[in-house]
Image: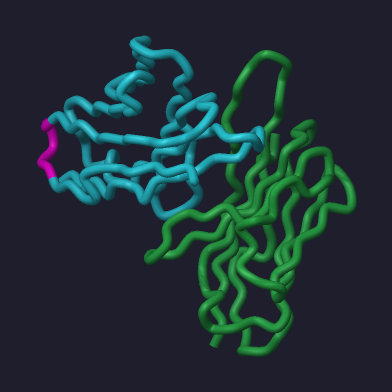
Amino acid sequence: EDKVVQSPLSLVVHEGDTVTLNCSYEVTNFRSLLWYKQEKKAPTFLFMLTSSGIEKKSGRLSSILDKKELFSILNITATQTGDSAVYLCAVEGGTSYGKLTFGQGTILTVHP
Amino acid sequence: DAGVIQSPRHEVTEMGQEVTLRCKPISGHDYLFWYRQTMMRGLELLIYFNNNVPIDDSGMPEDRFSAKMPNASFSTLKIQPSEPRDSAVYFCASRRRLAGTYNEQFFGPGTRLTVL
C-alpha cells in the first residue's frame, strides 16, 4: 500500500523565520510528488516534482525531490503570517494513473 | 474558467436521510476525484473516474456510498442512509491528462456535511 509521511505534524514560528517541511514516501511506480497549501478551504497547488535534484521555486517557496532516498522538502523563507496553513504532500504512483495518496499534512502557524 | 464547482457548500441532515453531493469538473478535464477530509483521517480518496468511467472505488467506505458520472460535466456522490460518522468535508477535484505530461489536480471548494 502506498504511504506518504509528513513531518513535523505541526510547527509554530515567527515572521521572518525559515521553515523546512519534510515528506517521505513509499510507492510503487512513482510518477510524481505534489505539494498543496490548504487554508480554511480547498487545497491549492504549489509544486509538482518528477525528477530528482531539480529545485522548483516560486517566490519564497522552493521544493526539491530525492528519488533515491524517497523524500521531498518544502522550504519557506522569510515566513509571513499569510503562510499559516496546512501543507499537504501527495504522491502519484502505482497502477492507477492519476490517483494521489496524501500525507497527513503539516500545520504551519506563523506568529507576527 | 470557473474552476471545479460543488454544491451544496454546506449540508446539515439527520441520521438516516439520503444526501447527494454534486460536482462539475473543469471543462476539458477527463479525470474526476471524490475525496473526504476529516481531522482524524486527513484527506482520503473515495473514488475516481476517467472519461466518466469509475476506475478505482476502493476508498468508498461501504455500500451506503455510491458515485456516478453520467457525463463529462457532472458527477454525484450519494450517501444513503447517512450516519453521524459521515460528517466531513467532501472535495471534488478534476485533472486533465496530456500525453507525456503530468499535471495537478484542481480542487473544488468542498461540501461541509454534518449528520446529526
Residue B106, above or below A48: below
Image quadrant where one finds the C terminus of chain B: bottom right
> Is residue B2 toward the left or the right of residue B88 in the image?
right
In the image, what residue occupies the spot 51% across and 32% down? A28
Residue A40: horizontal and vertical position, in percent?
41, 54
In the image, what residue occupies the spot 44% across and 64% down? B38
> Is residue B28 toward the left or the right of residue A76 in the image?
right
Question: Chain A hue?
Answer: cyan
Residue B33, above or below A69: below
**Chain in green?**
B
Q: Nearer the viewer, residue B79 or B19?
A: B79
Q: What secondary structure predominates along the stretch shown in magenta?
A: loop
Query: In the rendered structure, does residue A80 fall within the stretch colored magenta?
Result: no
Residue A83: horizontal and vertical position, in percent?
28, 39
**Residue located farthest toward the right when viewing the structure as drawn:** B70
In the image, what residue occupies the spot 38% across and 16% down? A56
Image quadrant where one finds the N terminus of chain B: top right
Magenta range is A13-17
Query: In the rendered structure, does residue A15 fall within the stretch colored magenta?
Result: yes
Q: Nearer the viewer, residue A15 or B101?
A: B101
Q: Nearer the viewer, residue A111 or B22?
A: B22
Residue B4: horizontal and vertical position, in percent?
67, 45
